Image (spheres, rainbow, N blue to C red):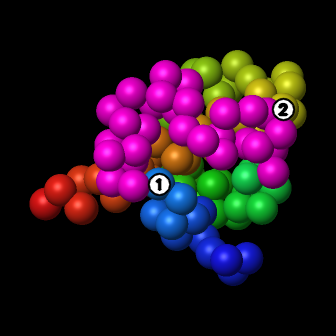
Amino acid sequence: MENLTFTEWLQSKYEIEELKDIAEHGCASCAPGGMIYYSETAELYNRFADDIHAIVGEHIANVGDMPQIIIDSFDSATSFQNLMVWFAAELVAYDLASELMA
């Protein structure tokens, strides 16, 4: 499992209903196991930083900007990592849930 991408990790970690919850309500609201504590999101960020930045970068390219909450977190590495992981997870969960429901 060490060579998984962030997307593959999410697919292997969560069931479709959990992915739908993440997509619809966000990580802060549904508190998915494995992404609750700063220590967990920091570990995920460090493991999948390239994937996470690519996912968020694609979003920025499509939408035109980064969510203000992430910009506001630049003063704290911990908050920035946490929000980047959550935001990437929400974007991927939305795409995966949409694909699986189609």
Q: Would residue 92 be found to the left or right of residue 6 on screen? A: left
How far is the residue under mark 2 from the one under mark 1?
24 Å
Query: Is residue 23 located in the magenta-colored stretch of the structure?
Result: yes
**Is residue 56 something that shows in the picture?**
yes
Compare residues 11 and 53 and report the one nearer the observer: 11
Image quadrant in which the N terminus is located: bottom right
- The earlier-in-sequence mark between 2 and 1 is 1
**Is 65 included in the stretch rendered in magenta?**
no
Tell me if mark 1 has few (under 14), some (14-19) or many (20+) residues whose alpha carbon lies within 10 angstroms of its own.
Answer: some
Which amino acid is tagged 1?
Tyr
Which amino acid lies under the numbered mark 2 shown in the image of this protein?
Answer: Thr
- Please provide percent x and percent y for residue 54: 59, 60
| Residue identified by numbered label 2 | 78
Q: Residue at x 83, y 39 (%)?
A: 39
Query: Which residues are the magenta region?
Result: 15-43
Secondary structure of residue under mark 2:
helix
Q: Which mark is residue 89?
A: none
Task: Return the x and y of residue 28 as percentages of the image width and height.
Answer: 55, 25
- Return the x and y of residue 4 as percentages of the image width and height: 63, 75
Task: State which quarter of the image contains the C terminus.
Answer: bottom left
Q: Nearer the viewer, mark 2 or mark 1?
A: 1
Relative to the observer, which residue lies in front, 34 or 57?
Answer: 34
On screen, 58 above or below 24? below
71 left or right, relative to 6: right
Could you say where residue 34 lies in the image, as x and y percent from the top left?
A: 66, 45
> Residue 55 versus residue 30: which sits nearer the camera?
30
Our reading of the magenta stretch's main secondary structure is: helix
Residue placed at 39% from the left, 27% from the top?
Answer: 25
- Circle 2 packing at 10 Å, graded few (<14), some (14-19), many (20+), is some
Q: Residue at x 73, y 42 (%)?
A: 41
Quarter of the figure with residue 6:
bottom right
Tag 1 residue: 14
